[in-house]
């Protein structure tokens, strides 16, 4: 599998060497005595459960964080922890999941921010543009460097981030869950870029929760658990089961445990929802106990449809019936009162009050209160109960959500909506960023919710999730419902055909 | 749900630690407060007397009362620049209701508070319905209220309120001056609202992430409206106390007052980015300012220097807040 080039480079001196590195946060030993070597030109995947310490380890490398103890050597030089800029000078670049680009500047300006090609304080715009073009080409992006970053899609912005890493001539590129917000096609093209960088001797550190990806891209895999390294293995010595066992310390028999639920009456019926160009005459219904999937390409309008039903965005026309009666939903508040819940896909931007505690976030939609007074005891108990139920890793439920690992933050959002007892629940990419163990728990939970007689809508870009969990799948294409498939009709080809607008294939 | 077989290596349940770190910013201000207090006790014999201390309390009471409302506004990531001129408007208009319309004292005071609340509601209207940034909405009110004061008073002080009106600003229950009692009541109420009520909880949530709050079904606009009304009402109440202290409604009152009010909240750890702030912190901030003012008088320091010192304290306090924020941001993904 590895080209001769990579094989030869793997015998080279490691480009990064971590010696007994630890990082302690108040109350948490996030990284615990880690020894690790990264070789030039390898794709090194870091895997592990939520809160295992993966992101923290990467932040130590990029010197956003300072280790409590231990040594880090980069290109034979000992890191002195003078901050991210110093790390960049040593050749370490990190692409965060939340990008760090300036939205109101152009692509070119972003690429050279702080390093503008300039003479006597005057920026040489032409040179800036030309160099920007070269860099963008290397990351497979064919766009005008003068475009504003805010006008780019998420996938394009990510490419710009990678180009920025190339601009500083990074030797080590860290990608923290880079595919979480990408569509399948974009993922493949990202992998092409990664393979190209790799052939130029750049080491890639890659964090992901998606097993299929790990096997597609990795040369070596390091599994972390509770801050320590379980093992580092070449990908050839691993299979899915073994990897899962290393990650969670036990076997997971079924990733998608779908409980058989009795399907009852129609709970939610949506007819002819239209909103500008985004949604065109969308109709669907969900029954009690049923899990309805929303499939489609990124941007097909799945999230928009959910938001429209939930009253988060105003609609131009359309009607909504709940339990056979027409209701008017003007705001999320009205939707929640009627018994509809919506778990947003963007947890940081829309799901969490990051500066508040876990407990306060869990009860945000259902604050136990009487005459405006909060029942603090009931709140604490509720929060503790949900936190235990979902196995949220936090030293205390009072901890600010900001300090939790990504996957645990996601669980906090889920906990909030479980508490609302909604009859209809929209889950928008609920498994994004959570580890295999938690994913299995999440899906078993979704199954249980259906079994309780709730109607579930599951939005996902990952087809296996939909194919395994759903009773029916609605496929969207360019703001319209392209088709609805029942379980007997399920197949990846059919869904893809509908999602890409190849209608004839779906009869 | 099944728990993972792994052992969690997370140590000491750190609720206490968490609280301490939350309080650190206040501790910085509290530390400064204590240091200045001890310093003044040593260098000035006149400082540590009941008389002087009550004086300090009375002098800062109006600022501190208004600062309680400001804290709520700042927690929602807003700002209320109009409190100074709204205080003047309430003082003058409240006095006019007693002088010209024959309102009894209690009703006159209440009228002042209601006028403040109405001004707050207008701020709230611009912020919520018209969606203006709070800075602009309340800047408009700052100017408009100032103009209105001069219109209704013709620019002259309003004297002649019933003599019982003096009690509010100059009276005492036993040895304790009424403005201090008023401050204690407002502060306790503010503390209670912020820590125990929906209004308080939602204020923090809105300041921390308005979109998450909205999608959690919180009627964001309604709560913002309430918060601006409270800020206006407390500005009105503060204005009535100030008017009572000088026995008249003064059209020139309150110019620049908002700066001290905002400084109190900010020194006390309220973050202008929203989501953070406490009444206790704000009180510490207000008293820090009061001690600097009182100390300057006792030590014969020119008032201009005193303003410079307060400016420096604001810088340091906000710088501290900023540092802490950056650190948190770097730590979380
Ligand atoms: N700034 C911080 N302050 C306190 N604790 C923190 C901080 N950052 C991370 N932690 C804790 O350190 C542990 C490791 O977190 P980290 O973010 O590295 O996990 P992760 O492996 O990246 O998880 P995920 O897959 O969910 O992203 C967690 O328990 C987390 O709560
Ligand atoms: Mg992470």
Image (cartoon, coloured by chain):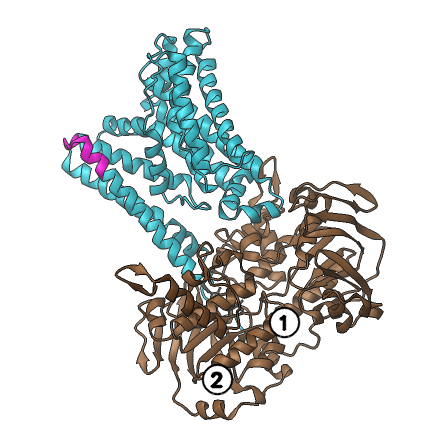
What percent of the width, then of the height, locates residue B146? 38, 22
Does the magenta portion include B124?
Answer: no
Residue at point 36% right, 67% down?
A: A84
Does the magenta portion include B305?
Answer: yes
- Image check: A124 left or right of A464? left
How crowded pointer 2 is (Cα within 10 Å; few <14, some 14-19, many 20+) is rated as: some
Label 1 SS:
helix
Can you see residue A223? Answer: no
Tell me which corner region of the image, top left, top right, bottom left or bottom right, holds residue B141.
top left
Image quadrant occupied by the N terminus of chain B: bottom right
Tell me which corner region of the image, top left, top right, bottom left or bottom right, holds residue B182.
top left
Q: Which mark is residue A487?
A: none
The picture's colour for chain B is: cyan
What percent of the width, then of the height, locates residue A230? 51, 81
Q: Which chain is brown?
A: A
Which residue is tagged 1?
A185
């Amino acid at each position: 599998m590895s080209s001769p080039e990579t094989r030869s480079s793997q015998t080279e001196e490691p480009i990064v060497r971590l010696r007994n590195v630890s990082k302690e946060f108040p109350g948490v030993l996030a990284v615990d005595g880690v020894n690790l070597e990264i070789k030039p030109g390898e794709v090194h995947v870091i895997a592990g459960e939520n809160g295992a310490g993966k992101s923290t380890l990467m932040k130590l490398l990029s010197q956003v964080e300072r280790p409590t103890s231990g040594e880090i050597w980069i290109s034979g030089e000992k890191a002195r922890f003078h901050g991210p800029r110093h790390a960049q000078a040593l050749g370490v670049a990190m692409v965060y999941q939340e990008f760090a680009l300036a939205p109101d500047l152009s692509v070119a300006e972003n690429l050279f921010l702080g390093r503008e090609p300039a003479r006597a304080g005057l920026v040489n715009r032409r040179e800036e543009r030309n160099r920007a073009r070269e860099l963008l080409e290397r990351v497979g992006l064919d766009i005008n460097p003068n475009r504003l970053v805010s006008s780019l899609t998420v996938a394009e912005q990510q490419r710009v981030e990678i180009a920025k890493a190339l601009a500083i001539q990074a030797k080590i590129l860290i990608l923290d869950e880079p595919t979480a917000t990408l569509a399948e096609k974009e993922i493949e093209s990202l992998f092409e870029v990664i393979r190209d960088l790799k052939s130029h001797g750049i080491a890639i550190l890659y964090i992901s929760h998606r097993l299929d990806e790990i096997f597609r891209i990795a040369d070596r895999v390091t599994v972390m658990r509770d801050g320590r390294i379980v093992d580092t293995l070449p990908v050839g010595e691993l299979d899915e089961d073994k990897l899962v066992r290393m990650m969670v310390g036990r076997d997971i028999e079924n990733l998608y445990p779908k409980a058989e639920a009795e399907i009852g009456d129609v709970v939610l019926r949506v007819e002819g929802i239209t909103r500008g160009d985004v949604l065109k005459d969308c109709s669907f219904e969900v029954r009690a106990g049923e899990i309805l999937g929303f499939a489609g390409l990124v941007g097909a309008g799945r999230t928009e449809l959910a938001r429209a039903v939930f009253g988060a965005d105003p609609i131009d026309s359309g009607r909504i019936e709940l339990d056979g009666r027409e209701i008017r939903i003007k705001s999320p508040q009205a939707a929640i009162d009627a018994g509809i819940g919506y778990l947003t896909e963007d947890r940081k931007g829309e799901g969490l009050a990051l500066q508040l505690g876990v407990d306060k976030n869990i009860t945000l939609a259902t604050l136990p209160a009487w005459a405006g007074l909060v029942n603090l005891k009931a709140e604490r108990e509720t929060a503790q109960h949900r936190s235990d139920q979902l196995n949220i890793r936090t030293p205390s439920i009072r901890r600010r959500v900001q300090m939790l690992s990504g996957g645990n933050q996601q669980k906090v959002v889920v906990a909030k909506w479980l508490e609302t007892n909604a009859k209809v629940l929209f889950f928008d990419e609920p498994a994004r960023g959570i580890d295999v163990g938690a994913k299995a728990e999440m899906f078993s939970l979704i199954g249980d919710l259906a079994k309780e007689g709730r109607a579930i809508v599951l939005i996902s870009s990952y087809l296996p999730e939909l194919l395994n969990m759903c009773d029916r799948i609605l496929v969207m294409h360019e703001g319209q419902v392209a088709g609805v498939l029942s379980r007997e009709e399920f197949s990846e080809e059919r869904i893809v055909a509908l999602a890409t607008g190849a209608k004839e294939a779906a009869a | 749900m099944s728990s993972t077989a792994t052992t969690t290596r997370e140590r000491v349940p750190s609720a206490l630690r968490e609280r301490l770190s939350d309080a650190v910013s206040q501790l910085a201000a509290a530390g400064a407060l204590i240091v200045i207090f001890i310093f003044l006790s040593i260098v000035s014999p006149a400082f540590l007397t009941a008389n002087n201390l009550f004086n300090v309390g009375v002098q800062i009471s109006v600022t501190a009362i208004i600062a309680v409302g400001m804290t709520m506004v700042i927690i929602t990531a807003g700002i209320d620049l109009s409190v100074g001129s709204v205080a003047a408007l309430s003082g003058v208009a409240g006095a006019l209701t007693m002088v010209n319309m024959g309102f009894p004292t209690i009703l006159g005071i209440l009228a002042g508070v209601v006028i403040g609340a109405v001004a707050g509601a207008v701020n709230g209207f611009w912020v919520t319905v018209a969606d203006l940034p709070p800075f602009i909405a309340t800047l408009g009110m700052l100017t408009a209220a100032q103009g209105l004061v001069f219109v209704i008073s013709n620019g002259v002080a309003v004297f002649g309120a019933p003599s019982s009106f003096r009690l509010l600003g100059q009276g005492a229950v036993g040895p304790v001056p009424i403005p201090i009692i008023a401050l204690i009541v407002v502060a306790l109420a503010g503390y209670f609202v912020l820590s125990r009520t929906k209004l308080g909880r939602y204020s923090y949530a809105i300041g921390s992430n308005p979109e998450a709050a909205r999608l959690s079904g919180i009627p964001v606009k309604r709560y913002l409206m309430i918060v601006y009304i409270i800020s206006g009402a407390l500005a009105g109440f503060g204005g009535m106390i100030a008017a009572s202290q000088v026995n008249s409604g003064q059209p020139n009152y309150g110019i620049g007052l908002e700066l001290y009010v905002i400084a109190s909240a900010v020194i006390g750890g309220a973050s202008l980015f929203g989501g953070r702030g406490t009444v206790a912190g704000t009180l510490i901030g207000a008293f820090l300012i009061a001690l600097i003012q009182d100390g300057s008088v006792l030590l014969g320091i020119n008032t201009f220097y005193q303003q410079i010192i307060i400016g420096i304290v604001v810088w340091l306090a906000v710088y501290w807040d900023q540092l802490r924020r950056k650190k948190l941001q770097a730590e979380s993904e």
